[in-house]
Amino acid sequence: MSTYRQPGVVLTDRHFAVPLDHRDPGGEQLELFGREVVAGSRVGDELPWLVYLEGGPGFGARRFVGRQAWLGRAVQEYRVLLLDQRGTGRSGPQNRQTLAERGGPEAQAEHLARFRADSIVRDCEVVRHRLTGGAPWTVLGQSFGGFCATHYLSTAPHGLSAVLVTGGLPSLDASADDVYRAAYPRIQRKVEAHYARYPQDIRRARRIAAHLAEHPTVLPGGYTLTTEAFQSLGILLGSGDGSHHLHYLLESAFVRVGRRHELSDAFQEAVLAALSFAAHPLYAVLHEAIYAQGERATDWAAERVRAEFPQFDAATALAGDGPLLFTGESVHPWHFEVDPALRPLRACADALAARTDWEPLYDATRLAANQVPVAAAVYHDDMYVDTEHSLRTARTVRGLRTWVTDEYEHDGVRASGSRVLDRLLGLARGEL
């Protein structure tokens, strides 16, 4: 355990041993990492704990500097734990390198089935008892972190003094097919709004896609940029300033080399940074598994459901004169062909997609009897989490109070500084 300072805060790096499989507490252990953050002026105070669960799956907790974003508001009254969820950050990261030691694809899939919200919440309960002596704490869940928080309410509400969710109220019963059937129209609306803002990008996107249709490009590091991979840059459109970033990316795509044009090095580097899963492979491998419950296989739902929306087909768009539609909040089998960080995990991903023995994640009956103060920011037409799914869940959870807004996109808790957190705390406490 090490302690050090940044502007306005004192940080302590903490490590916790938890069972890899909570059904076998005496078996293999996994080391979790969490960073405690407390205001420099309140180091010695008795403060309640707030644990932050990052979005994903597959992302470690954000590495703040000082009192950035919502953290500055939180440390006014909490001792904050920025917890790297299992398999992410410094908590036993799972990737092509570490998973190779687990054996073949089936063994890897069996291993990764322990890295969903159910195991993450059990980890939180182990950590909570060690930090608080058993006192309940507040959970702040962003995106997938909100999925985890909803599972927490379903299974261990005694550990919670309050729950705050930002852009992450999941459907309690939607299948992966249902999730993507709702997602593609949202993504199309985001793309159309982008083209309305930047109509010049219609021609630019078509030109890049046409070039890639004839010349798939291997980016630095070995990522193969195909037309479908290029379309997946639409993932940028889910954040507050993502449309602007996409526009700037497209405008610098080509450089003239003699009498021909080539994709510029700058464009290729920027695209690689946006599309590579090297830093968060679990986002791809577990992306559909986070929705799985019961005996129904996910079976590459996003890929199958996409066939119901032919307007997203690049070849059809290029054969006509209409705009190319970007995609984004979906993972497909071809991701495991174009991305060198994912190629060794293709068979593992197939095994997870075929799995039919998933534990249930949510208990609607228990949520209907909820006693924990809960507040949730629901972003209107959120690209990542369906708004109607979220509101249906909000109506199920007893006492949950929502703030529905189009002022922010999915990353609102990051973009707003302290405002979103301050609003949710007021709602949870009945002050607003």
Image (spheres, helix red, strand yellow):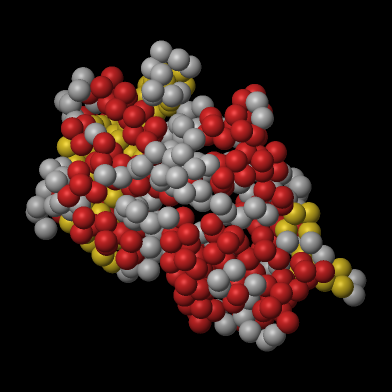
Which residue is pictured at 36% across the width and 28% down the height? 123
Residue situated furthest right in the rendering: 258
| Count of picture labels | 0
Residue situated furthest top in the rendering: 26
Quarter of the image holding residue 95? Answer: top right
Residue situated furthest left in the rendering: 431
Which residue is pictured at 71% across the width and 52% down the height? 338
> Residue 268: x and y, percent?
71, 57
Query: From the viewer's perspective, is 46 left or right of 184?
Result: left
13 up-or-down from 214: above or below? above
406 up-or-down from 350: above or below? below
> Residue 203: x and y, percent?
67, 80
Which residue is pictured at 43% across the width and 24% down the height? 21
202 up-or-down from 150: above or below? below
Q: Which of 74 and 351 is in front in this view?
A: 351
> Residue 364: x and y, percent?
24, 49
Quarter of the image holding residue 281? Answer: top right
Residue 219 in view in this figure: yes
Quarter of the image holding residue 345? Answer: top right
